[in-house]
Image (cartoon, helix red, strand yellow):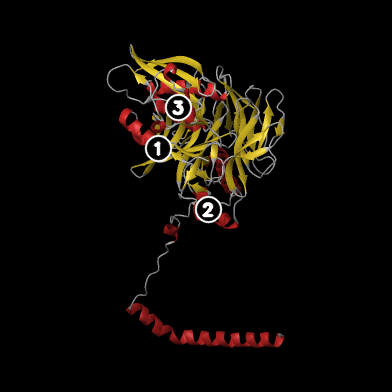
Amino acid sequence: MFKSVKTGLGLACVLAVMAGCSSTDTDDSANQMVEQTPPPVVEDTTATETVVPLDNVVYFDFDQSLLKPSTRELLIKHADRMRASTSGTVRLEGHADELGTREYNLALGERRANAVRDFLVLQGVNAGNLEVISYGEERPASEGSSESARAMNRRVVIN
Amino acid sequence: MMKKTVSLFFATLVSCVLAVSAQAQLVVEITEGNQDPTPVAVVPFDWSGSGVLAEDVSSIISADLRRSGLIAPVPREDMLSFPKTPEEVSFRDWRMLGTEYVVTGRMQPQANGYLLSFDLTNIFGQRKVFTKQVTGGAQQLRDIAHRAADEIFEAITGIRGAFGTQMVYVQETQRGGQPSYALMLSDIDGARARQIRRFSAPVMSPSWSPSGQEVAYVSFETGRPAIFRENLRTGARQQLTNFKGLNSSPTWSPDGSKLAMVLSKDGNPEIYVLDLPTGRFTRMTRHFSIDTEPNWMPDGKSLVFTSDRGGKPQIYQLTLATGQVDRLTFDGDYNARPRVSPDGKTLVMVHRSRGVFTIATMDIVSGRMRVLTETRLDESPSIAPNGAMLMYATKRGSKGILAAVSLDAGVKYSLPSQQGNVREPAWSPYFD
């Protein structure tokens, strides 16, 4: 094992020396080429990338208000932006599926929105900039009684 | 078991007569009746005025009695004669038809309205049970019919009739691609539906004041949930709450002086009582769980409510004087939105068994539970003031409809909406 490492290092040294030699060899010709045709210019677009909208809905399991692991990654990105942002209040709208009673679901929607709020506050977002509102099952995102429709409705929307 | 549709009858009657929004109408479909209903003939009433009456009063009475499930009205085409008075009733003819009671009646015009004199005759007993009179204004033919039906029903069954009561419910329709919500008021048979108020944001949880003059409800019109009270006669409206978080589940105390509700301004949903004369709020629960859906016991001394303090939603009782909380339901892993029968002995609730949400009753003393319905997404049970039946919301296909079931599960009927989804029925108290 030691042997192979030594061999590797030796080879690297040889290559470095060779590279050094070749660069000095081609210096003149390279300069000439730059003068003739300027290379393509690369612009830094990092600044415009930050306004690409993030997904603003997080989903929950039936009768649950625990954040899923996949949700946490997204919320950390939201928190980063909210800390940087100066633009006012963000509404966290909690929703539930059609199963169960309407008033209990109103409370469940609030519990979900609170879970999102608490996570964002832990990430350093100012609690005063977050407003929680629950619509329960009164504003479904998807009509119908299939499990996929219900999964779409168990959500918190970040607005 | 009886399977009978009377929707055509109602639809025709209503479209001929009423200026109220016919598109909002609910129609009655009787799906299941009592095993052994009493046969009663309501003979077409005599009319001594001119022209044709705007409503067929004896037909409305027959439909009321049929909906109770305890009475089987004799079809008009089976009647051998149309007696106008008890003296004209042929006991032998009616006995041959198996009819147990005959109702005869005479409509007369009165200043600004009508007078109905009606008689109940017991065929097997060969005696007149009563003759009574009911009067009403020019627009009150249906009210006259319902009051007469109440009297006939009580004389035959011993149960006070609730045919003259009303209900409030929520209707959701699409308007220009957007959902539109309305709080609706109709007779308990679904007829004479009218809009109390229209909203562009959700409206929910209507609850009657015990006087029958007002409703409380939750509206999202301000951008967040708030509790309102509205006078049904004057249209006067007042916003009662505007707290941060939930403002939900208002229910009126039996004496009308208080409103129980749910507020989450303390961080999570807690039961509060608002004293209406003073405007003072008193917090009744202190628990980190969801406490919601309060409803009053008839003596006004305690509340029943839903809480998930045990891990799953179950029903608890809160004694107001002491603050003591006792768990009432143990059967199943989801029992919620309790309502108490007028005698205080029975709870009705939404109950999940094997993944299906149904309406169930529970005897409060024995804890014995009974499932009344077998559809999938049943919710929002509301009991009639006579304690005989309850109205609830369910789904047919993807459509929200209202349905009724007797508390002994023997009678069922549904009231599908002709337009939009309907839900959250609230059965009115008696108006006298």
Q: Which mark is residue A151?
A: 2
Q: Nearer the viewer, residue B4 or B178?
A: B4
Q: Residue at x 36, y 82 (%)?
A: A32
Real-space Cα separation, disc 1 to disc 2, in angstroms: 37 Å
- Which amino acid, mark 1? Ser
Q: Which mark is residue B93?
A: 3
Of callouts 1 and 3, the N-terminal one: 1
Q: Is residue B413 left or right of residue B302?
A: left
The image position of residue B312, as x and y in percent, is 66, 43
Task: Identify the residue at the far front of this view.
Answer: B92
Q: Is residue B143 left or right of residue B16?
A: right
Q: Residues within 10 Å of mark 3 (few under 14, many from 20)?
A: some
Residue beneath disc 1: B7
Q: Where is residue B363, by image quadrant?
A: top right
Q: Nearer the viewer, residue B337 or B191?
A: B191
- Which amino acid, mark 3? Asp
Q: Is residue B309 visible?
A: yes
- Which amino acid, mark 2? Ala
Q: Nearer the viewer, residue B162 or B196?
A: B162
* Camera-nearest label, 3 or 2: 3
Q: Residue at x 67, y 24 (%)?
A: B320
Chain of residue at mark 2: A
Quarter of the image for the N terminus of chain A: give it.
bottom right
Secondary structure type for disc 1: helix
Secondary structure type for disc 3: helix
Q: Nearer the viewer, residue B97 or B102?
A: B97
